[in-house]
C-alpha cells in the first residue's frame, strides 16, 4: 500500500457511459469509506508503439504495480495497425480466468429468483487461439489448443475460489465425448486439482446437458469451470437468467495475482453523456474487486445497498423500467449505506 495507508487501485473510466458510471463508483466508495485510492488512467488518442494499442505502457505498468484495477467499457477504435484494447489488456496482463458471479437480484423479477452461481472461463486458449487458415479452396481449419498448464491454472483458480467463497461444488463443463483429446485433457487437469480439495464436490457435465439444466433449473449449479468458447457462451446465458448484461459483474484474474474488474456491457453510445446509465454492473464488479482484496465488510455493505435500492424500486434507471438518472440512483445507494 502507498504512504497514505490506502490501497492504490488503477481505474480506467473508459468511453461512452464509462466516466458517468465510474463517477458513481467513486462516490459510493467515498461514502462507504473504502480504504483505497484511485490511480486514473485514460485510453490514449494515439497508438502507443510499445503496446501497439491505444492503451499506454504506463497504464499497463500501473495495473502490474497495483495488481488490482477497475475498468469501464472501452469503445473499439476503428482502423488498422493497432490491437484491440481488451485484447491488449488480456494478453499483456495475462488475464487467464474470467469470473462472473450471477445471482438473482431481489425485487427485480426474472424467470428465476434462486440463481446463485459463478462461471469461471479459461480466457487464453481453446477455440480462441486465433489459429485459422484455409487448407485448400472450400476447406478451412481452426485449431483448438488446450494445454495442461492453462487448464491446471484455471482449475486451480476455480477450486481456490470455491473454497475462499464458501461454495461447495465445482462443475467442469465439457464435450469430452466428442472432443476427446482437448476436452479430455481439460477434464483430467480438473480431476487432478479436485483431488487436492476433498471438501469440495466435483462433477463433470456435458455442455449440451448443462444448457438444458441451466434454463430449466439454474439453482442446480454452484461454481462452473470451462474452456474458452463454452465459457463465453454459458456466461452470457447466465447473465440473461438474472436480467441481462447491464447487471452482471466480472473479474479477470491474471498472472501474479493481478485482478482487473470490469462491467460486461459496452460503452452504450446511444445514452452516453445523458445521465441515464445504470452503474450497477460496474458497482458490482467493484464489489468483486473488494472481495478479492479481502475487504469483505466494505464489499458486502456496498452490495447490500445496491440490491436494496433496486429491490425498493423507487429509484431505478431506464433499462430497469424506471425513470431515475444515474446521479439519483447513485444518491439512493449512498443513502442506503
Ligand atoms: P453496449 O453494451 O454498449 O450497448 C447495448 C445496449 O445496452 C444499448 O442500448 C445500451 O444503451 C444498453 N446498455 C449497456 N450498458 C448499459 C448500462 N450500464 N445502463 C443502461 N443501458 C446500458 O453494446 P454495443 O452498442 O454493441 O457496443 C458499443 C461499444 O462498446 C462498441 O464500441 C463496442 O466495441 C464496445 N464494447 C466494449 C466492451 C468492453 O469494453 N468490455 C464490451 C462490449 C462492447
Image (spheres, helix red, strand yellow):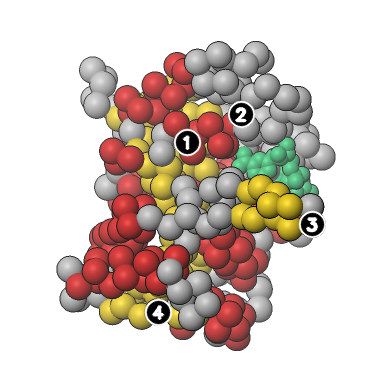
Q: Position of residue 246 (x, y in %)?
A: 65, 53
Q: CA distance from mark 3 to mark 1?
A: 32 Å
**In the image shown, does 143 or 126 lie closer to the viewer?**
143
CB at mark 2 closer than 8 A to ligand 1?
Answer: no
* Number of the label disc, if any, that sits on residue 91: 1
Judged from this view, the residue extending furthest toward the front is 136
Residue at left offset 73%, top offset 24%: 80
Q: Is residue 195 above or below residue 142?
A: below
Assess disc 3: are there few (<14), some (14-19) or many (≥20) residues with their C-alpha within 10 Å of its C-alpha: few
Asked if the residue at tag 2 contacts the one at tag 1, i.e. Cβ–Cβ closer than 8 Å, the answer is yes
Is residue 336 visible to us here?
A: no
Q: Which residue is mark 2?
A: 83
Which is nearer the N-term, disc 3 or disc 4? 3
Left or right, residue 108 beside residue 288: right
Q: Which residue is mark 3?
A: 138
Q: Which residue is mark 4?
A: 204
Q: Is residue 34 above or below residue 329?
A: above
Assess disc 1: are there few (<14), some (14-19) or many (≥20) residues with their C-alpha within 10 Å of its C-alpha: few
Q: Secondary structure at mark 4?
A: strand
Amino acid at each position: 500500500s502507498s504512504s497514505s495507508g490506502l490501497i492504490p487501485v488503477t481505474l480506467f473510466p473508459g468511453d461512452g457511459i464509462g466516466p458517468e458510471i465510474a463517477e458513481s463508483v467513486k462516490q459510493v466508495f467515498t461514502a462507504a469509506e473504502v480504504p483505497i485510492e484511485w490511480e486514473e488512467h485514460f485510453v490514449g488518442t494515439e497508438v502507443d508503439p510499445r503496446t501497439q494499442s491505444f492503451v499506454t505502457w504506463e497504464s499497463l505498468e500501473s495495473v502490474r504495480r497495483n495488481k488490482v484495477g477497475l475498468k469501464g467499457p472501452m469503445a473499439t477504435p476503428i482502423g488498422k495497425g493497432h490491437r484491440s484494447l481488451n485484447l491488449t489488456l488480456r494478453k499483456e496482463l495475462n488475464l487467464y480466468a474470467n469470473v462472473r458471479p450471477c445471482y438473482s437480484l431481489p425485487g427485480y423479477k426474472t424467470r428465476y429468483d434462486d440463481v446463485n452461481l459463478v462461471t469461471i472461463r479459461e480466457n487464453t486458449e481453446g477455440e480462441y487461439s486465433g489459429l485459422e487458415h484455409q487448407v485448400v479452396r472450400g476447406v478451412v481449419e481452426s485449431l483448438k489448443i488446450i494445454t495442461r498448464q492453462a487448464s491446471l491454472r484455471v482449475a486451480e483458480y476455480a477450486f481456490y475460489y470455491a473454497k475462499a467463497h464458501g461454495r461447495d461444488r465445482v462443475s467442469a463443463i465439457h464435450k469430452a465425448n466428442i472432443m476427446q483429446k482437448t476436452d479430455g485433457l481439460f477434464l483430467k487437469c480438473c480431476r487432478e486439482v479436485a483431488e487436492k480439495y476433498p471438501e469440495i464436490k466435483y462433477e463433470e457435465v456435458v455442455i449440451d446437458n448443462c444448457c438444458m439444466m441451466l434454463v430449466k433449473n439454474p439453482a442446480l449449479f454452484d461454481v462452473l469451470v470451462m474452456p474458452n468458447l463454452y465459457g463465453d457462451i454459458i456466461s452470457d446465458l447466465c447473465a440473461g437468467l438474472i436480467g441481462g448484461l447491464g447487471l452482471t459483474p466480472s473479474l479477470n484474474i491474471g498472472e501474479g495475482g493481478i485482478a482487473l474488474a470490469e462491467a460486461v456491457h459496452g460503452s452504450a453510445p446511444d445514452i452516453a453523456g445523458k445521465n441515464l446509465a445504470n452503474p450497477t454492473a460496474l458497482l458490482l464488479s467493484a464489489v468483486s474487486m473488494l472481495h478479492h482484496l479481502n475487504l469483505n465488510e466494505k464489499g458486502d455493505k456496498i452490495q447490500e445497498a445496491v440490491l436494496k435500492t433496486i429491490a425498493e424500486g423507487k429509484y431505478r434507471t431506464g433499462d430497469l423500467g424506471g425513470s431515475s438518472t444515474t446521479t439519483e440512483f447513485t444518491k439512493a445507494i449512498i443513502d442506503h449505506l
